[in-house]
Image (cartoon, rainbow, N blue to C red):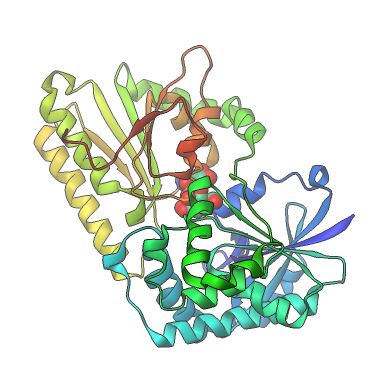
């Protein structure tokens, strides 16, 4: 079988000081890749990702010998200081907010851009060292926009694909990026570039012609397409019947009684629209006092980037709003919002998907959103729940039976 080197910022296993070893990392990208059936696709997958040089070298060697499922891991060691600048400054303060249309949060820094270039070159060199002639290289996400260009400059013969997990914004937004040319000139070197949604591909193509103009004919022979990512459907179906899931269902059903649950499962991130979602629930309780005691919101928030001030600030705002809604509408027998700030096991998640009459995805922008797909496949066909799905998710084009919502229009 031919080999495919899958490359992402993080490996699917992260070093944990607490566990003194490697534990599986969570998040959309890992969930999506877990669904890959390597045999069906006809590749032997191996996973390359960054590890910083503060991790004990012995542990790094250990990581080279452990696998994630069938996937062998290849750590790429990057100096910690450079990594932090690249990740916090360029990835999280420029690309992430700009590509999710949150322009007021963008903070440009030349140092961050320097570190981004350095890390992308280091990663490209590591790929070149590892790759055999007939390997396929599959690069994931916005952390590595420049990697295809660096690879092709040295090894034009290597087959390179790129998949973007976040939205590609309108060219009106994209062209504000000072490094727009460098990014596009690298992406057009790929043999294949994939997006979740047709609108992202359209924005990419219009950015190419606006930013690169007359050079458009250079990339006519290259390929791009729409390949919406999905989940391991059978795994989520199997989870619905697992004995561990049933234990949670029984325990929660007792507490829930005949109340209706509106579920939310989101990483702590401004793109997920948590504040707008909580405000819409508050508005609902205000307008429908008869629903008090009958409807509860269960919101799981998965800690993410908690060392970044904007995220800590968001956490505080979310918690203030939760306690204000609970204070205003709660009674000794009724807590309107159940707020959970930690991850839960996949069995507990499956139980919550099955017990909740409504799932509310209120993202301000979201590349795809896998949680809504997981909710849909976890439903009982005889009495399925209802999915409220923001128009601003990639999944919105796929799930035509969802109730489409504009997260900003709660008060209308
Ligand atoms: C990025 C893009 C795009 C969450 N909490 C728990 C838990 N999860 C799992 C969910 C789901 C995954 O994490 C989250 O996936 P999303 O797609 O919703 O979100 P991002 O992490 O923002 O992912 C996104 C994705 O990449 C893939 O391309 O869809 O738009 O932003 O699988 O189930 N899993 C468990 N416990 C939890 O508490 N076990």
Residue 42 vs residue 155, the one in the foreground? 155
Q: Give me the residue at 53% from left, 46% from top.
A: 198
Residue 412 image-quadrant placement: top left
Q: Give me the residue at 21% from left, 32% from top.
A: 335
Residue 356 vs residue 227, the one in the foreground? 227
Q: Give me the residue at 68% from left, 73% from top.
A: 75
Q: Give me the residue at 78% from left, 78% from top.
A: 155
For the N terminus, the quadrant is bottom right
Whether residue 56 is visible here, answered yes or no, is no
Query: In this view, which residue lies farthest toward the top?
Result: 382
- 237, above or below 343, in the image: above
Residue 163 location (% of width, % of height): 61, 58
- 332, above or below 149, in the image: above
Left or right of 214 on screen, residue 156: right
Left or right of 192 on screen, residue 399: left
Residue 10 location (% of width, % of height): 58, 66
Query: In this view, which residue lies farthest toward the right?
Result: 1
Residue 311 location (% of width, % of height): 31, 63
Whether residue 300 is visible here, answered yes or no, is yes
Residue 352 vs residue 287, the one in the foreground? 287
């Amino acid at each position: 079988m031919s080999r495919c080197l899958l490359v992402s910022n993080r490996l699917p296993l992260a070093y944990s000081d607490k566990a003194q070893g490697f534990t599986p990392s969570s998040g959309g990208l890992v969930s999506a890749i877990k669904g890959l059936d390597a045999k069906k696709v006809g590749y032997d997958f191996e996973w390359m990702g960054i590890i910083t040089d503060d991790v004990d070298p012995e542990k790094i060697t250990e990581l080279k010998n452990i696998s994630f499922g069938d996937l062998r891991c290849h750590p790429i060691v990057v100096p910690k200081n450079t990594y932090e600048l690249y990740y916090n400054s360029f990835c999280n303060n420029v690309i992430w907010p700009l590509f999710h249309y949150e322009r007021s949060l963008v903070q440009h820094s030349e140092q961050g851009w320097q570190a981004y270039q350095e890390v992308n070159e280091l990663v490209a060199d590591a790929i070149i060292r590892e790759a055999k002639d007939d390997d396929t290289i599959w690069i994931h996400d916005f952390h590595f926009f420049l990697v295809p260009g660096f690879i092709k400059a040295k090894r034009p013969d290597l087959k390179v694909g790129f998949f973007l997990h976040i939205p590609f914004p309108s060219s009106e937004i994209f062209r504000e990026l000072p490094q727009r040319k460098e990014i596009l000139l690298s992406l057009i070197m790929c043999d294949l570039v994939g997006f979740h949604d047709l609108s992202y591909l359209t924005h990419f193509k219009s950015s190419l012609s606006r930013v690169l103009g007359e050079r458009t004919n250079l990339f006519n022979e290259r390929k791009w397409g729409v390949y919406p990512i999905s989940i391991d459907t059978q795994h989520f179906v199997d989870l619905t019947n697992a004995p561990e899931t049933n234990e949670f269902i029984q325990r929660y059903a007792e507490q829930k009684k005949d109340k209706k649950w509106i579920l939310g499962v989101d990483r702590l991130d401004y793109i997920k629209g948590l504040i707008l979602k909580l405000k819409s629930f508050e508005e609902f309780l205000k307008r429908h006092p008869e629903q008090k005691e009958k409807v509860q919101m269960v919101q799981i928030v998965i800690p993410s980037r908690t060392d970044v001030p904007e995220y800590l600030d968001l956490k505080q705002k979310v918690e203030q709003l939760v306690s204000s809604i609970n204070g205003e509408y709660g009674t000794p027998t009724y807590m309107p919002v159940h707020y959970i700030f930690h991850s839960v096991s996949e069995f507990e998640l499956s139980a919550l998907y099955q017990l909740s009459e409504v799932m509310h995805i209120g993202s301000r922008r979201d590349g795809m959103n896998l949680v809504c797909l997981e909710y849909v496949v976890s439903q009982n066909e005889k009495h399925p729940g209802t999915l409220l799905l923001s128009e601003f998710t990639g999944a919105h084009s796929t799930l035509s039976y969802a109730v489409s919502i504009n997260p900003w229009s709660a008060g209308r």
